[in-house]
Image: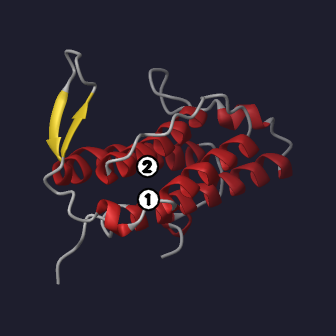
Amino acid sequence: MTLSMYQASVPVFKQMLGGLSGVLAKAEAHATARNITPAALLQARLYPDMFVLLRQVQVACDFAKSVSARIAGVEVPGFEDKEESFADLQARIAKTLAFIDSLSAGQIDGSEARQIVTQAGTPKEKIFSGQSYLLNYGLPHFFFHTTTAYAILRHSGVEIGKKDYIGSY
């Protein structure tokens, strides 16, 4: 049995975004229970030159929607980066999941050889096959940002573990 491009993308993004949503819910509850200003967690980072939690979540969502859109051959939806609260981040995850859910297996399967161009017309332009874009670029970047969001919260004392990160499958 072969693994399809759809199976390697949409269910993975959905599972991990579900885990990220759950981790954020626990972080918000943690802040409330300990009388911590939510901004202290939302603006937390592991090192000064890294993105803060809020931005890690935005970028994770951006990779989930943009990779899914590109391999499906549809326009990448634009999301404004105006989130300021846990509720805003939950809404962004929900919007990302709704977009991903709108894509069918028929739109994505067979996209292994589709040409994907990132940052077209710039010195950073890269050309990928659909399969390489998903497996060697998109998923690693997505996992980096979901993992970093988890690590920021764990480092900040939120009681979360691997089951929270992985989500439901």
Residues at marks 2 and 1, CA–CA distance in whole angstroms: 6 Å
Answer with left or right where residue 104 lies relative to residue 78: left
- Residue assigned mark 1: 13
Looking at the image, how many numbered discs can be counted on the residues? 2
Assign a secondary structure to mark 1.
Answer: helix
Residue drawn where x is 81% and y is 35% of the image: 37
Mark 2 touches mark 1? (CB < 8 Å): yes
Residue drawn where x is 66% and y is 43% of the image: 89
Q: Which mark is residue 44?
A: none
Where's residue 24, x and y in %? 65, 51
Q: Residue 8 versus residue 147: which sits nearer the camera?
A: 8
Q: How crowded is mark 2: few (under 14 residues within 10 Å), some or many (20 or more)?
A: many
Image quadrant holding the N terminus, namely bottom left
Answer with left or right where residue 107 lies relative to residue 124: right
Residue drawn where x is 55% and y is 62% of the image: 19
Q: Which of marks 2 and 1 is nearer the N terminus?
A: 1
Colour scheme: secondary structure
Q: How crowded is mark 1: few (under 14 residues within 10 Å), some or many (20 or more)?
A: many
Kind of residue sitting beneath label 2 = Ala
Q: Residue 105 versus residue 169: which sits nearer the camera?
A: 105
Where's residue 121, x and y in %? 22, 18
Where's residue 142, x and y in %? 39, 47
Q: Residue furthest top?
A: 123
Where's residue 27, x and y in %? 70, 50
Kind of residue sitting beneath label 1 = Phe
* Residue 108 showing in the rendered view: yes
Answer with left or right where residue 4 lies relative to residue 25: left
Image height of 153 relative to 18, above or below: above
* Residue 148 showing in the rendered view: no
Assign a secondary structure to mark 2.
Answer: helix
- Residue assigned mark 2: 64
